[in-house]
Image (cartoon, rainbow, N blue to C red):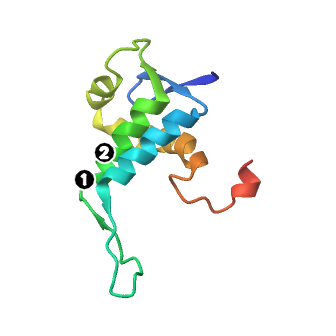
Amino acid sequence: METKKIRTPSGAELELKTSLTFGEVQEINATLAKEIEIEYDEYGRPKTPKVSADLLIKLEKKEIEKTIISVNGEKENILEKIESLDGKDYNFIILEVKKITKLYGFEEKKNFREEL
């Protein structure tokens, strides 16, 4: 497994995976599947799915769990450690995590072929 280390704006050091396994992608997908309810109209066509308001937070947490290996060299309780970091690190961390998870279709890619 290939990893990379980055430093957040507040100075925390994170180690992240550069790719995910098949099973990790499935776990992230399962987070989405549990929260999306699809209803059908009288013609059998799907309506716009109903999604819980906290789905984005649940998805972010699952993506963090699957991509971040360590916080300041510590590998236990990753999500708790991330949540205790300075608030100014939030956007930075989410963007770094999304760089990894978007490769698996969790975020729309505009120039997919150019990024490969």
In the picture as drawn, the residue positioned furthest to the bottom comes out as 43
Q: Is residue 92 visible?
A: no
Q: Which is more toward the observer, 63 or 26?
A: 26
Instruction: Say which amino acid is labelled 2.
Output: Lys
* Mark seen at residue 54: 1
| Residue 101 percent across, percent down from the top left | 53, 43
Please report the residue visible at 34 percent of the width from the left and 69 percent of the height from the top: 49
Is 112 located above or below residue 20 in the figure?
below
Residue in the image at 49% along x and 41% along y: 26
Residue at horizontal 30 percent and vertical 23 percent from the top: 81
State whether residue 74 appears in this view: yes
Residue 54 position, x and y percent, is: 25, 53
How busy is the neighbourhood of tag 1: few (under 14 within 10 Å), some, or many (20 plus)? Answer: few
Circles 2 and 1, Cβ within 8 Å, touching? The answer is yes
The residue under label 2 is: 58
Front in this rendered view, residue 42 or 109: 42
